[in-house]
Amino acid sequence: MNFSDRISRIKVSSTGAVVARADQLKASGVHVFDFGAGEPDFPTPDNVKRAAAEALAANFTRYTSTGGISDLKRAIVERHRRDFGSNYQPEECVVTVGGKQGIFEAVSALANPGDEVILPVPYWTSFLDIIRYADGQPVLLRTHENEGFALRAAAVERLITPKTRLIMVNSPSNPTGAVVPAEEMEKLLALVERHNLWLLSDECYGRFLYAGARPFSLGASGNRENLVVVGSLSKTYAMTGWRVGFALGASKLISNMVKLQSHSTSNVTSFVQRAAVEALTGPQDSVESMRAEYERRRNRIVAGLNSLPGVHCTMPGGAFYAYPNVSEYLSVGFDVTTLTARLLDEAQVAVVPGPAFGSDEHLRFSYAASLEQIEQGLARFGAFLTQLRPAHAPAYANA
Ligand SMILES: Cc1ncc(COP(=O)(O)O)c(C=O)c1O
């Protein structure tokens, strides 16, 4: 059987594969210390659940307009204005099935076959396959752990060619938690204007920043003609399963994204849209309490990882991921994917291996897990590494 080139060149999301294996173990009664799933461990706030139930009871169950109900588009631009100081209009907004659909639609609407798309590494796993599926040509820009995975506009500029069409940025980043400073973001925006390119800014973790850092969106910049911002309610309001996100951008781009959506999913589930209005317009205290809890967990897990011999982890500025380097435990025939599989099977600790994000020496720990799970998981990870050390970390033997 033959399938299209387009479908053959992408893979199933590898973060999904770890979650599936961990779920299998859990279903067979094994307790898994789960740092795999990239989703909040908190429940969706009650007021949001109630709004969905009320919308169902009121029979709000029909198709809506493809790009979202007006109340929700208004709620999104208003929330974005309050949180980040932007001034988008509802016609510059499309409601999507999670941030993921927004990225998919934006890349599909912008990239022609062979167009180059600059993507910083480590990248969120879906970016690469979304570019490939759209017939784009990913151009990878490696960022470095010893610089905190900092993204620099000057490094991006060096990769621009006549075929470049789009630059994709995700701050705070999945998987590193790195935050691109506002000045560097502004430089990127100036760069895309100068070269007549597009910038996609994925702000799905934009409300989870630590150490007093203030939320920032390029959407608040003066000239945003060449910018598309993607956001999501998934992480901010612990609503991953509800599937609701959005994109903000020039109305011409947005209407092309809506055109694509009109032939695929149509609208986001009607009653979910009502719940999303409540999430965005109702009390916001749950966002701050989740943020504060993630910060406590970040401090604990990063300190714990760095205390393990031969492991080093940069301090993430946002999101809920730690990305330790475990290269001292790797050797020919024992790569990070093998380490991850053994860690799950032998120590019941689930993490995602770095190759899912374009790097060979790291593991991604999602710390959307209780402090207790973090403590126990770290202890098991440490014991697992100790048992590996003689065979796999000769350098450490001399330490
Ligand atoms: C960087 C990044 N962007 C976008 C998404 C998409 O999330 P959703 O489609 O649930 O909004 C995710 C989810 O993990 C993510 O990590």
Image: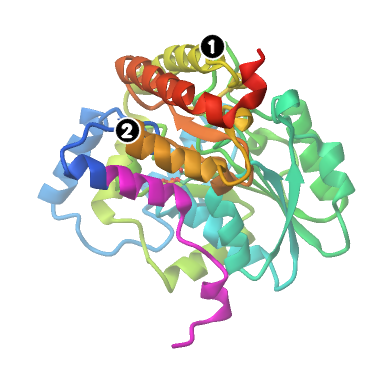
Is 221 situated above or below 227? above
Q: Residue at x 36, y 14 (%)?
A: 375
User: Amino acid type of disc 1?
Assistant: Ser
Determine the residue located farthest toward the bottom in the rendered image: 1
Magenta-drawn segment: 1-23
User: Amino acid type of disc 2?
Assistant: Gln
Q: Quarter of the image containing the C terminus?
A: top right
Which SS type dominates the magenta stretch? helix
Of residues 124 and 347, the one nearer the viewer is 347
Specify whether 143 is left or right of 236. right
Numbered label attached to residue 307: 1
Of residues 21 and 202, the one nearer the viewer is 21
Numbered label attached to residue 348: 2
Query: Which image quarter: residue 172?
Result: top right
As helix, strand or loop, the secondary structure at mark 2 comes to loop
Q: Could you say where residue 82 lies in the image, as x and y percent from the top left?
A: 51, 27
As helix, strand or loop, the secondary structure at mark 1 comes to loop
Numbered label attached to residue 289: none
Specify whether 139 is left or right of 58. right
Q: Earlier in the sequence, mark 1 or mark 2?
A: 1
